Image (cartoon, rainbow, N blue to C red):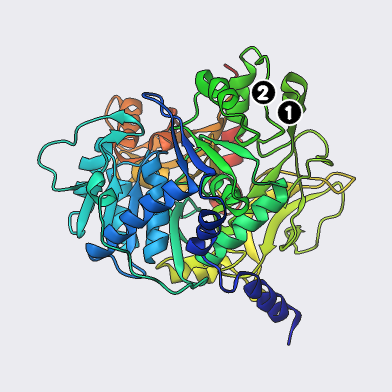
């Protein structure tokens, strides 16, 4: 047996006999009265669901899905903002053996049609504000279920849409058939941006989620007494794996808000005695602009990098981490007692192999930077596959199982790791990864430009925002800038919409006549306010 096959066998043994229904059942049986989820809507009163309460609701929804023809392995779209309905539906899919396809609620019709078609969804669950969009994007599904509120704000479903009220799913009384525990059954799909023009569907197994839950809890030293504040979107890995599954592993509690709100953050945190949260630097900057609270219960924050300014302002320890949808949990992680220097993201996490290489394949040494590769076990510590995308799967891994992340990582003289840049043509807009090529494809389809190049302009809050340089065709309208921005708004999620259009007679070129994007980037002043 080779070393790699021995590691694979060991990782698979870790999750044997376990899946998400198994994990939830542990706490339903042991601590049924422990709060699992505290819902803090922006309108109305908070709501607490104990482990017992939550299990009863998801069993009803799982039974309703089964009764309406959702079978093992079927894909069900969840197009919902943070809400009890999202969490119940995600676990109900796991219970019945379906695959939850959680989609970004900032998506437009072009995205939604692609998501529904590529994933091959058979049903969808959404909220009133998205009902028309989901219905028109997936007209051939078995059924559409719609809640009676938008993340806690009551609303009516638009006329002319055929749907099942979500309350009807919750009212199901028939039992949900038992399903054999299968750690390697498919569990969830999330769409993530790559360098191609369309997002890739990252497929997780139950084993992935069990691995992620356990590793998240270990990295953060969580216990059942911990209470996390969740406001990052649950349709993404950060909140779904780090916060939700990490808490579930230890039988902890999560306090869920519809989205981040700087004005509501401290009130909710203090009322619920929150002890930790995962957030991004954007959120930290917004909070630091406010007066510090008189008291709090936080023992740490994870803002992706170590931020001493948080420690000084609030007395809250911080440390960094790095992960991606494909890694389920953190492949690089800091330590609460040894967080490293400012902006450090940590060191190699247990359970993963990491190499940081020069272009010629040599490993970097302290004081150098290189491209990050990670290796784990497919379907356990790394995602199973890009769903229905054999070409992407073939390109993603080399013969030795290394996955190229596309991230450039510097190492300081002491071995601490930092996030450097993206080797691939990607932008980081707030918490969202954006492929420049996706925006370029939309603009090129207009026929108004001969060539275009999307680059990131540094931004004081969002890291960077997309800007496009273009050379116009004879067919270009006089108000080309306004028309391109309107085109992007109609065909792209709001965070992908270009902030500016710069018209050129010709592009600067690098070797092989490629557009010199670095030169274009360097010409843009940072947005400081």
**Coordinates of residue 307 in the picture (x, y in percent):** 73, 30
Residue 472 appears in which quarter of the rendering? top left
Q: Secondary structure at mark 1?
A: loop
Identify the residue at image location x=28%, y=40%. 127
Camera-side residue: 77 or 511?
77
Image position of 317 (left or right of 174): right
Residue 200 in view: no
Inter-mark Cα distance, 1 to 2: 9 Å
User: Residue furthest toward the left?
Assistant: 160
Camera-side residue: 477 or 153?
153
**Coordinates of residue 118 in the picture (x, y in percent):** 33, 61
Location of the C terminus (image quadrant): top right
Is residue 125 shown above or below 179? above
Location of the N terminus (image quadrant): bottom right
Is residue 145 shown above or below 207? above
User: Residue furthest toward the right?
Assistant: 414
Question: Is the C-beta separation of discs 1 and 2 under 8 Å?
Answer: yes
**Coordinates of residue 18 in the picture (x, y in percent):** 55, 68
Camera-side residue: 398 or 236?
236
Residue 109 in view: yes
Q: Which residue is mark 1?
A: 316
Is disc 2 surrounded by few (<14), some (14 to 19) or many (20+) residues within 10 Å? some
Q: Secondary structure at mark 2?
A: loop
Identify the residue at image location x=26%, y=51%. 169
Residue 39 appears in which quarter of the rendering? top left
Q: Which residue is mark 2?
A: 296
């Amino acid at each position: 047996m080779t070393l790699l096959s021995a590691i694979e066998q060991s990782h698979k043994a870790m999750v044997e006999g376990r899946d998400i229904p198994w994990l939830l059942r542990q706490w339903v049986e042991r601590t049924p009265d422990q709060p699992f989820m505290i819902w803090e809507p922006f309108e109305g009163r908070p709501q607490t669901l104990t482990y017992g309460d939550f299990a009863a609701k998801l069993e009803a929804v799982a039974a309703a899905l089964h009764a309406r023809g959702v079978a093992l392995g079927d894909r069900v779209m969840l197009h919902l903002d943070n809400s009890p309905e999202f969490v119940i539906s995600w676990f109900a899919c796991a219970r019945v053996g379906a695959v939850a396809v959680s989609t970004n609620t900032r998506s437009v019709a072009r995205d939604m049609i692609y998501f529904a078609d590529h994933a091959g969804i058979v049903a969808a669950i959404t909220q009133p504000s998205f009902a028309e969009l989901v219905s028109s994007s997936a007209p051939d599904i078995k059924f559409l279920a719609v809640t009676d509120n938008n993340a806690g704000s009551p609303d009516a479903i638009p006329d002319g849409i055929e749907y099942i009220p979500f309350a009807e799913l919750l009212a199901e009384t028939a039992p949900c058939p038992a399903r054999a525990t299968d750690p390697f059954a498919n569990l969830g799909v999330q769409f993530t941006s790559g360098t191609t023009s369309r997002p890739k569907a990252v497929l997780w197994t139950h084993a992935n989620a069990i691995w992620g839950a356990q590793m998240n809890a270990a990295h953060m030293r969580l216990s059942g007494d911990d209470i996390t504040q969740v406001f990052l979107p649950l349709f993404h890995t950060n909140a779904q794996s780090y916060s939700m599954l990490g808490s579930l592993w230890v039988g902890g509690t999560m306090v869920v808000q519809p989205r981040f709100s700087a004005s509501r953050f401290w009130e909710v945190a203090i009322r619920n005695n929150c002890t930790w949260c995962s957030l991004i630097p954007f959120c930290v900057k917004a909070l630091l602009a406010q007066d510090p609270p008189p008291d709090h219960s936080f023992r740490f924050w994870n803002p992706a990098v170590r931020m001493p300014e948080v420690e000084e302002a609030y007395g809250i320890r911080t440390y960094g981490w790095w992960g991606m949808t494909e890694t389920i949990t953190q492949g690089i992680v800091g330590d609460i007692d040894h967080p490293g220097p400012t902006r450090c993201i940590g060191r190699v996490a247990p359970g993963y192999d990491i190499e940081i290489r020069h272009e010629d394949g040599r490993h970097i040494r302290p004081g150098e930077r290189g491209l990050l590769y990670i290796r784990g076990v497919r379907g356990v510590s790394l995602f199973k596959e890009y769903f229905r995308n054999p070409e992407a799967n073939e390109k993603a891994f080399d013969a030795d199982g290394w996955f190229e992340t596309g991230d450039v990582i510097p190492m300081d003289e002491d071995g601490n790791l930092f996030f450097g840049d993206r080797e691939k043509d990607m932008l980081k807009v707030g918490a969202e990864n954006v492929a420049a090529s996706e925006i370029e494809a939309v603009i090129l389809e207009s026929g108004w430009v001969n060539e275009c190049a999307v680059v990131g302009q540094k931004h004081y809050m969002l890291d960077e925002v997309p800007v496009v340089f273009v050379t116009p065709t004879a067919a270009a309208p006089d108000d080309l800038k306004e028309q391109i921005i309107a085109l992007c708004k109609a065909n792209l999620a709001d965070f992908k919409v270009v902030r500016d259009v710069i018209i050129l007679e010709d592009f600067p070129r690098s070797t092989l006549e490629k557009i010199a994007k670095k030169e274009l980037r360097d010409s843009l002043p940072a947005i400081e306010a």
